[in-house]
Amino acid sequence: MSESIVKGPAGYFPSIENKYGRPVSEWLEIIRDSPLVKHMELVSWLKAEYGMGHGHANALVAHCLAGGK
């Protein structure tokens, strides 16, 4: 029996949902609704505004800016 392993930013999603209490779809909507557009601006904003760790914020922003849904 082979288990599929999620790679890339999506690999962080279960721990993001568990730690911060919101589904990834909601985080992506929050990012899209932000007036910020640059990757590191968004990462810094998630860290400051929501207390998110760098890896989690980076994964969400990377996925969102890559067109993830």
Image (tube, rainbow, N blue to C red):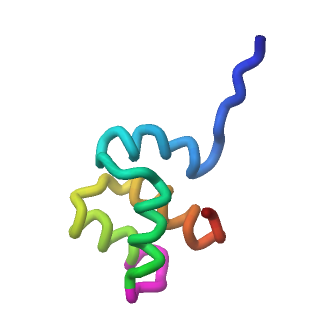
Residue at 58 percent across and 62 percent down: it is 63
Q: Report the side of 8 relative to 45 (left or right).
A: right
Report the span colored magenta: 35-41
Q: Report the side of 46 relative to 23 (left or right).
A: left
65 or 55, which lies in front? 65
Q: Quadrant of residue 44?
A: bottom left
Residue at 43 percent across and 73 percent down: it is 31
Instruction: Tell me where residue 66 appears, x and y as whole percent.
Output: 64, 69
Instruction: Tell me where residue 34 appears, x and y as whole percent.
Output: 38, 82
Instruction: Look at the image and say whether residue 53 sits in the magenta stretch.
Output: no
Residue at 35 percent across and 51 percent down: it is 22
Q: Quadrant of residue 42?
A: bottom left
| Quarter of the image where the N terminus is located | top right
Instruction: Tell me where residue 3 appears, x and y as whole percent.
Output: 70, 21
Location of residue 38 with respect to 43 vertically, above or below: below
| Quarter of the image where the C terminus is located | bottom right
